[in-house]
Amino acid sequence: MKVGEILVVGSSGTSHPNILHAVCDQVMKSDQEILFGKLGIDPELTLFLYAITSNRNKATIAWDLIARKMIGSIIVFDWNNTESFENAKHNLSLFNRKFDAPCILAADVKNNPLPVNPKIVNPFISLSPKEKFKFFNGRNPKSIKSLLISLTDVISAYAYQDEIV
Amino acid sequence: MTKQNPLKPEIKLEILKRIIKAEPVGPMIDALNPHEIIQVHRFVLERAMDFGKAIKGPSFTSSDITRYIKPINYENFETTGSVAGDKNLLAALETTRKQIDIIVKIAHQYAKMG
């Protein structure tokens, strides 16, 4: 059986734990305040998701141990919270320097209307071949699931790009 | 010319936020080096094109945006990578900054349209 690891990273108060609760069959909490979720895709493939809180002023996470095998990540932030946005930029910078896995920048608008015409973010806004920006509602399971679908699409496209280069 | 690093993703994210929220990009551009400023110009132009296509569909053409901006000649800069003492290149960068502001406004209008 194949397994894939996905990191779901947010900062204090963001909705990153909701993502695991919305998509995983089982969710457990480790003694390091990390949420761990398991999602069976089919008999041959299982995804393991880790929800991690990372604030830029408290750099205590051993990313090289946690993230070295990840196939992709979702960096969550609150669209209307400046501190949350700054944390997301910090985490994005860190991941970009250390790892090559694709990433979805997930801006949570909660139950507020989208601040843009939905046509421009369908399915996402591209920052690079491996970094995409997407709005979502962290209180809506269907919206949360669309994040994971987008991430798997980007992972597939990015892997295929590597093969044909 | 040596190969330049791509624009950092956190800068792209900051610019994208400013496009959507209609916040000025000038203050952040002042902190960037000339290569990054040129990359920002390319990035905002690509996003404005993407947004234009998404909103207007087949009726959109690149001239919907490029008619507001003139091509900029970076030829010497591409060769030397330096702007020191070159008035023409300094002027080109100033034009680039102004065009970024224009393109960001166009991209914001497309993002809000509909």
Image (tube, coloured by chain):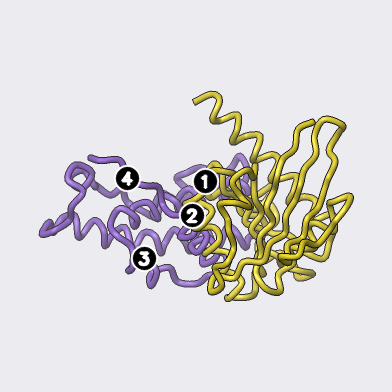
Badge 4 and badge 2 in a common chain: yes
In percent of the image, x 70 and y 55: which residue is there? A118
Task: Please state which of the two labelled residues, at mark 3 or mark 2, is closer to the viewer.
Answer: 2
> Label 4: how many residues lie within 10 Å, few (<14), some (14-19) or many (20+)?
few
Residue type highlighted by circle 2 = Pro
Element class at badge 4: loop
Residue type highlighted by circle 3 = Ile
The disc, 4 or 3, on the residue closer to the chain's N-terminal end is 4
Picture disc at residue B29: 3
Chain displayed in purple: B
Residue type highlighted by circle 1 = Ser
Q: Which residue is mark 2?
A: B9
The CA distance from mark 1 to mark 2 is 8 Å
Residue type highlighted by circle 4 = Gln
The CA distance from mark 3 to mark 2 is 15 Å
Badge 4 and badge 3 in a common chain: yes
The CA distance from mark 4 to mark 2 is 15 Å
Picture disc at residue A128: 1
Q: Which quarter of the image is occupied by the N terminus of chain B?
A: top left
The disc, 4 or 2, on the residue closer to the chain's N-terminal end is 4
x then y, percent, for residue B28: 39, 69
Q: Which residue is mark 4?
A: B4
Badge 4 and badge 1 in a common chain: no
x then y, percent, for residue A152: 71, 41
Is A39 in front, or is A158?
A: A39
Q: Colour of chain A?
A: yellow
